[in-house]
Image (tube, rainbow, N blue to C red):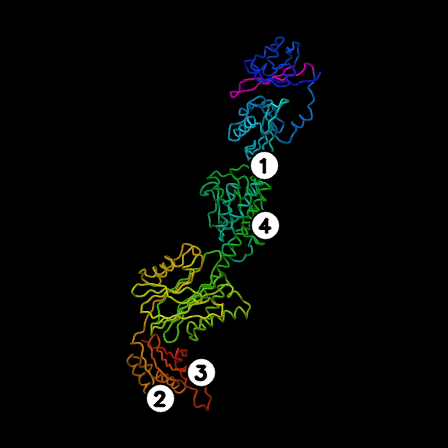
Amino acid sequence: MEHVAAAAIIDAQGTVTGWSDGARRLTGYAAEDVVGGAAAELLAEDVSPGAVAALAGEVVVRHRDGHRVELALTAQAVLGQDGEPHAFMVISARPGEPEPEPNLAGLSFQQASVSMSAFSTDQRCLRLNDVACRVMGVGEDALVGRFYLDTVPEDRTSRGFLQHLREVTRTGRPVHYESYTSAPSGSREHAWNIEMWPVRDASGAMAAVAMAAFDSSEQHWARQRLALLNEAAAGIGTTLDVVRTADELLGLVVPRFADFASVDLLDWVLRADEPSAAEGTHVVLRRVAHRSVTTGTPEAAVELGEEDTYPPFSPPARALLDGRAVLSRAGEPDFDQWLSGHEARHAKDREYGVVVHSLLAVPLRARGTTLGVAVFIRVANPDPYAGDDVALAEELASRAAVCVDNARRFARERSTALTLQHSLLPRGLPGQAAVEVAHRYLPSHAVAGIGGDWFDVIPLSGSRVALVVGDVVGHGIQSSATMGRLRTAVRTLADVDLPPDELLTHLDDLVIHLATDVGDEDVAEQGATCLYAVYDPVSRRLTLAGAGHPPPAVLLPDGTARIVTMSAGPPLGVGGLPFEAAELELPEDSLIAFYTNGLIEGRDRDLDRASAELCRALTVPTDSLDALCDAVLKSVLPAQPADDVALLLARTRALGADQVATWDISPDPERVAATRQYAIEQLTEWGLDETAFVTELVVSELVTNAIRYGEPPIQLRLIRDRALICEVSDGSSTSPHLRRAHVFDEGGRGLLLVAQLTQRWGSRQTGNGKTIWAEQPLPPV
């Protein structure tokens, strides 16, 4: 006879509350005929007290058609929340029949490698396989027939599971979702992919809900590691700052990967030097960053910025010396010796109750160079570091090391460029009487690096002064070097005493030649701008020309400030376009502000508004020009300027009538003697009789040459400034040349004599001809 498995649920009062399809086929009674009635009404004879007590025995049941059915029953108590039996699961078999062999489907269910369970439509456990029992931590007997929430702690995970069971029962549709639970050891979180589906009987009615749970922890943690690496790619190295980069690494790993983490670097890395050779077996590192799950990281044994010495057996030293990750755990001799042998660390661990059970030290290596070591420690997290953690830490450390090395290289290049920039800028402005000057140079802190901004003050003949400001567009050492070449070129051309527009024309040609002849196209490609101005304290006139550079601002003595109207001209290196000079007369004590575009230009700045802010800043009363420089930068510059800034302030002075004497000379050789007399009388009036002898010879020679070789009009001018200046102008553009006369030459010794008797001499072209000048020092007061 075919074996029919039957099951029924009977509550503590003997009422049938559940009836299986096997019970229907065995007894002939449908569920609606039995459920709700007394179980005793199904019996053909009374059950023996021994069988009731043992929850097992043979009984006789009356079939619906009247014949008797002998069954061997076993019952399992279904416990309630109070631990008392509230119902019984009764399972039947034929008396004397051997237990049937499980079929293939049953074996597949029981031996499946995933957790599988079946639940009734009222969420009671019906069946669990071996894996499900291991996950639950108890046997199947303790779970069958019990309500699901009675078998697990009630938390967010169990409530979600129950909600999905009910959803499948209500909708009749399968459900798939992912859940996270703690492992039985209470350590690492487990991830589960859960499938639930309805189970229907032959009539199509829902009889149960089946469930399969796949342990997807490895895939889950692989995704977590990949997500961490993706965050590292975007979150590490956002700035070219070594310390900030190290802290960004720790911000990612604490607390997700470590309870405490630190980054220690070799000292030469922070100095942006080249790698230094290791000395001795002990490793000295400087702490640049640390973090922990405790706010403020009070358990750190090494303070930020301090050095610490690591013995060769310590994990950080081994990682640094071997160039590979070192995994250490509590109980290892070297690990325990290092922790207990460091007095400060041991004291901190005792003070804060820190028990380190797992440590991972990873070297920071980039481009074949070891920069330092990152240490990851687990204290509260009970999981020790494993092989997959080592691979993740090495990848994170590798990315951080490249960013640290980039920051180090940037710092080194920036330091080199800044040193070069400062060496090429004026260290001390030369003494002159035309203007009072003050200046500021602010290097950029942007990622692009140091730019090519520069300025200069160049004394010219006749007490005049050249004021120069320029900017090589671009950043880095190349820009600084290009700036130095341009500054040297401007000084050379200024020595020729060219007008501003002509000087810029020659400078433009020079830039083109540099790019063409030498093959160095950096200047032409990057672009360079320049503003060259000449101020004459005698005429109080400012003549200036620009090559693509912002015009200066002028503050007059009456308090009005404005931007000078002038033609900007093309940038240097463009070629083929003219430069136009502008000229304005300034009252004494006027203020001129020369600057580079970094002061007023920016990506989000309005140029007109910034220029107005500059003019307003110049009107602020200050004690000195230096203080005014600081006030201008503070008022006009944004908090984080994106470009270098050079600022040059010049307050004009004027030479009065008591310092300048001028005579128009008739082109008659007989007037030379009278001219010498004019000069001697003027020197006597100035109290400079000691210079009369030399001045008389200079005046005689220069005036004679002007009369003999030059053209009218001829003019003599004496200027008493920091030196005594003698100037003779004529209408000829032919400049004299110094040469040595031979023994029998009757002429040619005049200029040689002038050169030997004076401090400096030279000539300059003017709009009407030329001027020959000579300077001699004033006698000591």
What residue does disc 2 label? 668
Q: Secondary structure at mark 2?
A: loop
Lateral position of residue 440 relative to residue 80, left or right: left
What residue does disc 3 label? 738
- Mark 3–mark 4 Cα distance, whole angstroms, equals 71 Å
Q: Which is in the foreground here, disc 1 or disc 2?
A: 2
Give the magenta part as a residue range. 72-96
Report the quarter where the N terminus lies. top right
Q: Position of residue 566 (x, y in %)?
A: 39, 67
Tell me which amino acid carries mark 1. Answer: Ser
Whichever of labels 1 and 4 marks the residue nearer the N terminus, that label is 1
- Mark 1–mark 2 Cα distance, whole angstroms, equals 110 Å
Q: Position of residue 192 (x, y in %)?
A: 58, 34
- Mark 1–mark 4 Cα distance, whole angstroms, equals 31 Å
- Residue 630 shows in this picture: no
- The part of the image, by quadrant, that contains residue 584 is bottom left
What residue does disc 4 label? 323
**Is the Cβ of the residue at disc 3 closer than 8 Å to that at disc 2?**
no
What residue does disc 1 label? 217
